[in-house]
Amino acid sequence: MYLDQTKKAEIFGQYGKSTTDTGSAESQIALFSFRIKHLTEHLKANHKDFKTARSLTQLVGKRRALLDYLKERDINRYRNIVKALGLRR
């Protein structure tokens, strides 16, 4: 599987407060970004996989909602996560 427990712990440790910090906005945004990159690569090879395309669109929407939430609450945390992940925004 492309996303196992060790990879999740690594993502949460890098962008969250600890390796078990699964609920903070930064860790969720980082996890969504990892999954979006994986699904994008999958769709490049399988362009007729419409269910995955729909899942990708939903995931992008969830990440956008979390980024909007973070932007409202704490602009510095928002800027840090956007810069760390290299998002266009």
Image (tube, grey):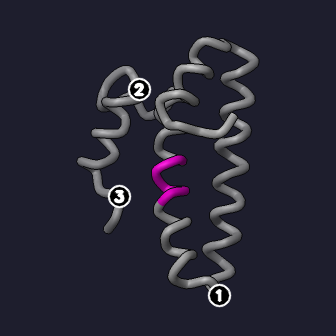
Q: Earlier in the sequence, mark 3 or mark 2?
A: 3
Mark 1, secondary structure of its residue: loop
Look at label 3 and name its amino acid: Leu
Q: Is residue 80 left or right of residue 49?
A: left
Q: Quadrant of residue 2?
A: bottom left
Q: Earlier in the sequence, mark 2 or mark 1?
A: 2
Residue 89 vertical placement versus 74 (above, below)? below
Magenta stretch secondary structure, dominant? helix
Image coordinates of residue 79 in percent, x first then y, are 60, 20
Image coordinates of residue 42 in percent, x first then y, are 50, 74
* Residue at the left extreme, as displayed: 6
* Residue at the bottom extreme, as displayed: 48
Q: Disc 2 and disc 1: Cα gap in Å? A: 35 Å
Look at label 1 and name its amino acid: Lys
Look at label 2 and name its amino acid: Gly
Residue 40 vertical placement versus 50 (above, below)? above
Image coordinates of residue 32 in percent, x first then y, are 53, 47
Magenta stretch contains residue 35: yes
Q: Disc 3 and disc 1: Cα gap in Å? A: 23 Å
Residue 61 vertical placement versus 88 (above, below)? below
Mark 1 — residue? 48
- Please state the extent of the stretch shown in magenta in the rendering: 33-37
Badge number at residue 82: none
Residue drawn where x is 37% and y is 34% of the image = 12
Residue drawn where x is 73% and y is 38% of the image = 65
